[in-house]
Image (cartoon, helix red, strand yellow):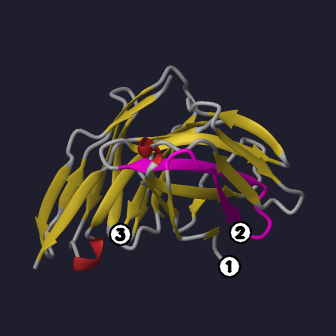
Amino acid sequence: KAGVTQTPRYLIKTRGQQVTLSCSPISGHRSVSWYQQTPGQGLQFLFEYFSETQRNKGNFPGRFSGRQFSNSRSEMNVSTLELGDSALYLCASSPVSPQGPSEQYFGPGTRLTVT
Amino acid sequence: AQTVTQSQPEMSVQEAETVTLSCTYDTSESDYYLFWYKQPPSRQMILVIRQEAYKQQNATENRFSVNFQKAAKSFSLKISDSQLGDAAMYFCAYRSVGTGNQFYFGTGTSLTVIP
């Protein structure tokens, strides 16, 4: 099976712009989560989508949004970019389980730099 | 909210020796999962080992084993016979059982393996 893929891998944007990141989960996985990773902060949870519905949301401002499509692919959008949004954005997918995700499989990440 | 604490930002070990990485967590839940993830310099995060809280037996995966102390809310990772390829950032993570529950990650421990 192909792993989780994320595009683009690297992105440079200027303050005030918006950006869209894409994530394709492992085939058959319907849960997709997004994380922001910065040095010293570790991984901060952004949101989780399951069957096209946002199931959980972290403590981020409304500038961060996401969606999931019927094929489970997911996108996240950041509007009005700030310098502090520079980070590695990780996507993770999980297989379906009655008790919720028991493990996550991560993509390689998108490195976003805001100048 | 649940918290995961990794008190060792950096650790080092001689090749072929054993090293233990520490992790503590805070929760009022009785049923949950604990994980150790490894993130090598290439940035792809991979699952090292998983522990279900209801299982008293400590999980093992080849050279990797955990010491799970539920009452103390402690979950340490032991790496035996350390290899150069073990050099990476290691993240401890927690998730309550049930849908709609997010993963919580620690801030990570950077492991250096000395030849």
Q: Quadrant of residue A90?
A: bottom right
Amino acid identity at mark 1 = Ala
Q: Which mark is residue B40?
A: 3
**Which residue is identified by label 1?**
A2
- In the image, B103 versus B19, the foreground residue is B103
* Numbered circle sitting on residue A26: 2
Q: Around disc 1, counting alpha carbons within 10 Å, would you say few (fewer than 14), some (14 to 19), or many (20 or more)?
A: few
Is residue B57 toward the left or the right of residue A74 in the image?
left
- Residue B60: numbered disc: none
* Residue depicted at 59% across the width and 54% down the height: A103
Point out residue A47 in the picture as x, y percentages from the top left corner: 65, 41
Q: Is residue B11 above or below residue B115?
A: above
Q: Quadrant of residue A20?
A: bottom right
The span from disc 1 to disc 3 (Cα, nearest Å) is 20 Å
Q: Please say if the residues under marks 2 and 1 sit with CB atoms less than 8 Å apart.
A: yes
Q: Quadrant of the C terminus of chain A?
A: bottom left
Residue B109, given in percent of the width and then of the height, sits at 26, 51
Sort mark 2 into few (<14), some (14-19) or many (20+) by Cα contacts within 10 Å: many
* Frontmost residue, B98 versus B45: B45
Element marked by disc 2: loop
Disc 3: which chain? B
Q: Which residues are magenta?
A: A15-38
The three-letter amino acid code for the residue at tag 2 is Ile
Q: Where does the image place residue A16, in percent across and percent down from the top left? A: 55, 44
Q: Going 20% across and 44% down the picture, which residue do you hit?
A: B8
Report if residue B103 lies within the magenta region.
Answer: no
Q: Residue at x 69, y 35 (%)?
A: A56
Q: Calculate the distance from the C-alpha at mark 2 to the C-alpha at mark 3.
A: 21 Å
Residue B99 shows in the view: no
